[in-house]
């Protein structure tokens, strides 16, 4: 890896990082009305996308779409300034958001939500723009028709194959896992195409994210009482820390707490310090709340902290770590803004909204 390859993209990253909203200012947005929130963001990078929202359509949903468009625009600008191998990795990272839109569409159709109500749930991303999303929603009476409408996409063949399993079991998680497997296997291949320190950093960051997906899936299945063999089919195959035998041991655990302890022991054996931090956070949260939703929020927060700790080890020089660190911070900012908008519109107390925000420590 040579630092000079980053000479075009790093000025962009540094500039965009300086434009992130200060945590203190973010906290002051809590409890503001949608209109006041827009006014407060008038001098930020979101100004352009917010100004495109008609006044009679201003809502938490229209703001969420504006925030996501702004994020995509920033990511594409970074891609345009990046060398080819980095740009390819970033394009795959962006696909995660398109995959998220697909999941929302399929969930809405499975739940028999009305078309207009569906549209209030779906946030277009990637190649699934507003026109394409409406086409799928309006022409799909069931999951099969929606999957058929998506068959020409890169992940279409995988979905077509997984629909057979869904029809047998009726378990929607299988469709979600198929989409996760597609995008994360592609991300892993993208990281392996890098060289030197970039490759080491990319695989470390993405490996932890992939294992976090597996941890979440494993704990969900444990809470739902899904048997071990079925759960194994939902897990992603890539991990440099958890071997198959160690995942099986966690699956065989009696409950969620013992499953976390089992994974923590495996992380300690592998000398995976960042994994142990994440799992310790999960154990502390679960023993105090016994709540799976709280556990998933803790996982999200802990993953961000672990990512940033990992990246600090490599930041003395220009490398992909600086880009991934910025994207983590940027997406967390978007997430926090969405929480503020949704919470206020939904009548959630400011105290509760603040509990849901995630900040770098």
Image (cartoon, rainbow, N blue to C red):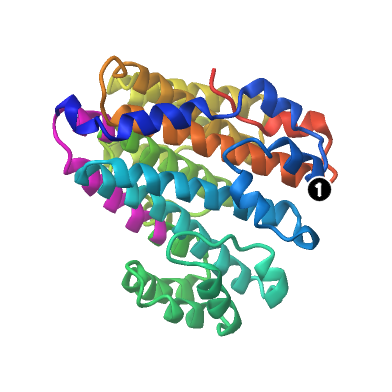
Asked whether residue 252 appears in the rendered view, the answer is: no
Please count the marks in the image: 1
Q: Is residue 88 left or right of residue 131?
A: left
**Residue 192 magenta:** yes
Judging depth in this view, the residue of 223 and 98 nearest the camera is 98
Question: Label 1, on which residue?
Answer: 345
Q: Is residue 177 left or right of residue 351?
A: left
Up-down relation of residue 92 to residue 325 (above or below):
below
Judging depth in this view, the residue of 203 and 344 nearest the camera is 344
* Residue 306 percent coordinates (x, y): 43, 24
Instruction: Kindly indicate the quadrant of the structure image that contains residue 2.
Output: top left
Q: State the residue at coordinates (58%, 76%).
A: 134
Magenta region: 179-202
Q: Majority secondary structure of the magenta segment?
A: helix
Q: Is residue 88 left or right of residue 113?
A: left
* Residue 44 percent coordinates (x, y): 61, 36
Judging depth in this view, the residue of 317 and 19 nearest the camera is 19
* Residue 45 percent coordinates (x, y): 57, 39
Instruction: Kindly indicate the quadrant of the structure image that contains residue 36.
Output: top right
């Amino acid at each position: 890896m040579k630092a000079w390859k980053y000479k075009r993209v790093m000025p962009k990253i540094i500039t965009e990082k300086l434009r992130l909203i200060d945590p203190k200012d973010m906290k002051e947005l809590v409890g503001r009305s949608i209109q006041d929130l827009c006014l407060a963001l008038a001098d930020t990078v979101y100004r352009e996308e917010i100004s495109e929202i008609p006044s009679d359509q201003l809502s938490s949903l229209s703001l969420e779409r504006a925030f996501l468009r702004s994020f995509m625009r920033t990511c594409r600008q970074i891609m345009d300034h990046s060398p080819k191998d980095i740009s390819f990795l970033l394009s795959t990272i962006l696909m995660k958001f398109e995959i998220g839109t697909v999941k929302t569409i399929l969930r809405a159709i499975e739940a028999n939500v009305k078309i207009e109500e569906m549209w209030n749930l779906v946030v277009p991303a990637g190649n699934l723009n507003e026109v394409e999303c409406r086409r799928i929603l309006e022409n799909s009476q069931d999951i099969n028709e929606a999957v058929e409408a998506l068959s020409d996409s890169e992940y279409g063949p995988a979905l077509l194959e997984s629909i057979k399993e869904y029809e047998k079991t009726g378990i929607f998680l299988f469709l979600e896992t198929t989409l996760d497997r597609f995008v994360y296997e592609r991300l892993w291949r993208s990281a392996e195409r890098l060289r030197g320190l970039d490759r080491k950093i990319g695989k470390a960051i993405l490996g932890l994210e992939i294992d976090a997906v597996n941890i979440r899936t494993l704990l969900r299945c444990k809470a739902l009482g899904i048997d071990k063999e079925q759960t194994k089919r939902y897990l992603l195959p890539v991990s440099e820390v958890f071997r198959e035998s160690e995942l099986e041991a966690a699956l065989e655990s009696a409950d969620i707490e013992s499953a976390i302890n089992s994974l923590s022991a495996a992380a300690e054996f592998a000398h995976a310090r960042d994994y142990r931090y994440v799992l310790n956070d999960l154990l502390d949260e679960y023993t105090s709340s016994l709540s799976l939703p709280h556990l998933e929020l803790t996982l999200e927060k802990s993953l961000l902290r672990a990512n940033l700790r990992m990246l600090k080890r490599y930041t003395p020089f220009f490398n992909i770590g600086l880009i991934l660190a910025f994207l983590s911070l940027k997406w967390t900012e978007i997430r926090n803004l969405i929480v503020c908008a949704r919470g206020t519109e939904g009548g959630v107390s400011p105290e509760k909204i603040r509990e849901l925000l995630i900040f770098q420590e």
